[in-house]
Image (cartoon, rainbow, N blue to C red):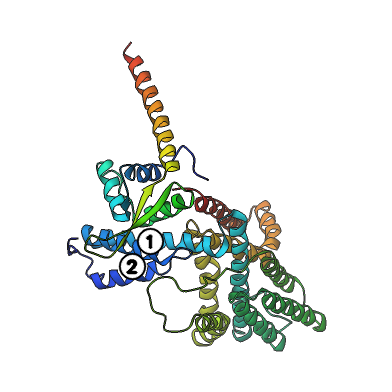
C-alpha cells in the first residue's frame, strides 16, 4: 500500500478521511461486522493508492451504500415495505411541519398573513397551545416508533381542533378544514405505514458514548422539541422566521429527501407524503381559485404554484418507485 | 434467485474478475480496472452493494479471510451457479457481437 498522495484537499487530511470512512462504514446496517470492516479497509486502500480526491469519491459511494442498506434493513426489500416505511416517516415529518406551524402561529401573532390556516380557534390561545403540545408529543412518539401513541396524539389534536371550532363563535371555515385534512393525511400515514425496524445492536467498530436507548430517547425528545425551537426562532427573528422555517421544512427538506431517495426510497416516499399533505392542507382548495384566475386571463402564478406542488408529489412518487426497484436489482 | 441475463456491466465484470479464483474487494476493483483497460473503475460502494446481492443470490460465496501482512480481508469466490450465469451472459454477448460483425460485413457488398 502506498502513501496517500498530497493534493489540493488540505482540509480533508488523511486522519479526517479515515475517521469519515470509519464513521460511514459503521452505518452499514443489516450486514455482519466483518463485511463492514472489509468495506472500510477497501475504501481506505483505494484512497491510499489513488489519493484524497478519489477517497472523497469513495466516501460518496459508501454513503450511498449505507443509505441503500439502511432502507432495506429498516423497511424490507419489497416496494410495499418501502412505501409503508416512507408513509410512516412522512407522516411524522408532516406532523412536525404542522406542529411547527402551530407554534409559530401561536407566538408569531404579528405575522397572521403568512400563517393563515393554523390557528386552532379564532385567535392564538389555549386551544392552539394544546394542539401544539399534542402535536409535539405525537412527533416524539412517532419518531421513537410508538405508533399507537402517535396515533392517539394525532387524534387528540383533531379533537382539539374540532372542539375549538365548535366552541368558538367565528371559528371554523377553510383554515380549520385544511388543518384537519393535513391531520387526516398524518393519521392515515401513521396507520398504513410501518415504523422503521431499528438495528438490534450497533454495527461496526465505533464505540458509543451513550446507550442506544438513551440516544434514541434523546433524539425523540429533540424531534418533539423542534416546534419549540421554531417558537424560539419566531420570538428572536420575528416575521422572517416562519417564512424561513416553512421554506426549509416544506421545500428544502423534502427536496433533499427526493435527492437521497434514489438510494433510500423511503425518504422520497416521505417527501411525497409531506408535499401531498401540504396540498391537502390548503392547496387543493386553491386549484379552483387558480383555474378561475387563469380563465379570467389574470395572474397564472397561483396555478403555477399548484402545478409545481403536484409535480413535486409525482416526482417523489416516481423516485420512490425507481429507488425501490434498485434495491431489489443487481447493479 | 433474482439474477438473470442480461447482467449489468459492473455485475458482469465482477463475476468475470472472480472467474480465475477468489479475490478480496480491492482485488476485484483492480482486476476490473485491468480487464477493462481502465475504462471501468468500480467504486467500493458499488462493488460491495453488488457483492452483497450476489452473495444473497448464491452467485458468489465467502471464501475465508486472507492476510498478506496487513489486516485480514474477506475473499469472495464464484459459485457454480455464478459461473453458469456468467457463461450464459458471455454467450449472449458473443452472439450479439457476431451478429453485429456479420451485419457490418454486409455493408461492403
Chain of the residue on which disc 1 is drawn? A
Q: CA distance from mark 1 to mark 2?
A: 8 Å
Q: Is residue A289 above or below residue A149?
A: above
Which residue shows up at 21% across the image and 63% down it? B69
- Which residue is painted at 69% across and 88% down in the image? A125
Callout 2: SS: helix
Query: Residue A245 got which mark?
Result: none
Please indicate whether residue A192 sits to the left or right of residue A31 in the image: right
Residue B68 sits in which quadrant?
A: bottom left
Cβ–Cβ under 8 Å for marks 1 and 2: yes
Q: Which residue is mark 2?
A: A21
Q: Nearer the viewer, residue B61 or A43?
A: B61
Q: Is residue A13 visible?
A: no
**Residue A176, x across and y down, in percent:** 73, 74
In the rendered image, which residue does mark 1 sit on?
Answer: A62
| Mark nearer the N terminus (1 vs 2) | 2
Amino acid at each position: 500500500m502506498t502513501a496517500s498522495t498530497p493534493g489540493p484537499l488540505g482540509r480533508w487530511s488523511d486522519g479526517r478521511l479515515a475517521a469519515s470512512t470509519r464513521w460511514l462504514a459503521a452505518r452499514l446496517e443489516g450486514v455482519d461486522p466483518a463485511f463492514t470492516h472489509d468495506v472500510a479497509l477497501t475504501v481506505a486502500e483505494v484512497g491510499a493508492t489513488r489519493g484524497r480526491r478519489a477517497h472523497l469519491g469513495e466516501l460518496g459511494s459508501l454513503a450511498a451504500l449505507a443509505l441503500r442498506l439502511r432502507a432495506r434493513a429498516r423497511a424490507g426489500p419489497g416496494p410495499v415495505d418501502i412505501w409503508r416505511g416512507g408513509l410512516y416517516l412522512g407522516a411524522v415529518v408532516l406532523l412536525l411541519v404542522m406542529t411547527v406551524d402551530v407554534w409559530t402561529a401561536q407566538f408569531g401573532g404579528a405575522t397572521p398573513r403568512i400563517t393563515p390556516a393554523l390557528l386552532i380557534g379564532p385567535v392564538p390561545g389555549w386551544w392552539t397551545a394544546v394542539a401544539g403540545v399534542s402535536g409535539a408529543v405525537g412527533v416524539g412518539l412517532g419518531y421513537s416508533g410508538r405508533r399507537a401513541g402517535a396515533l392517539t396524539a394525532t387524534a387528540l389534536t383533531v379533537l382539539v381542533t374540532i372542539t375549538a371550532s365548535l366552541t368558538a363563535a367565528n371559528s371554523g371555515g377553510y383554515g380549520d378544514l385544511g388543518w384537519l385534512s393535513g391531520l387526516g393525511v398524518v393519521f392515515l400515514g401513521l396507520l398504513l405505514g410501518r415504523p422503521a425496524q431499528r438495528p438490534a445492536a450497533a454495527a461496526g467498530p465505533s464505540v458509543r458514548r451513550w446507550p442506544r436507548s438513551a440516544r434514541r430517547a434523546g433524539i425523540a425528545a429533540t424531534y418533539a422539541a423542534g416546534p419549540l425551537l421554531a417558537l424560539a426562532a419566531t420570538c428572536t427573528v420575528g416575521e422572517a422566521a416562519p417564512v424561513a422555517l416553512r421554506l426549509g421544512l416544506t421545500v428544502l427538506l423534502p427536496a433533499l429527501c427526493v435527492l437521497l431517495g434514489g438510494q433510500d426510497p423511503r425518504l422520497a416516499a416521505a417527501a411525497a407524503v409531506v408535499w401531498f399533505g401540504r396540498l391537502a392542507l390548503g392547496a387543493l382548495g386553491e386549484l379552483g381559485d387558480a383555474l378561475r384566475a387563469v380563465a379570467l386571463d389574470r395572474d397564472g402564478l397561483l396555478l403555477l404554484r399548484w402545478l409545481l406542488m403536484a409535480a413535486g408529489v409525482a416526482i417523489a412518487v416516481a423516485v420512490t418507485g425507481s429507488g425501490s426497484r434498485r434495491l431489489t436489482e443487481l447493479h | 434467485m433474482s439474477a438473470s441475463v442480461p447482467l449489468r456491466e459492473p455485475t458482469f465484470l465482477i463475476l468475470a474478475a472472480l472467474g480465475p479464483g477468489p479475490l478480496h474487494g480491492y482485488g476485484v476493483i483492480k482486476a476490473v480496472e485491468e480487464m477493462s483497460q481502465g475504462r471501468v473503475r468500480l467504486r467500493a460502494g458499488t462493488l460491495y452493494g453488488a457483492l452483497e446481492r450476489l452473495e444473497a443470490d448464491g452467485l458468489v460465496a465467502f471464501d475465508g479471510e486472507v492476510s498478506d501482512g496487513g489486516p485480514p480481508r474477506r475473499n469472495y469466490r464464484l459459485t457454480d451457479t455464478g459461473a453458469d450465469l456468467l457463461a450464459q451472459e458471455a454467450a449472449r454477448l458473443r452472439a450479439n457481437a457476431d451478429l453485429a460483425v456479420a451485419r457490418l460485413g454486409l455493408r461492403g457488398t
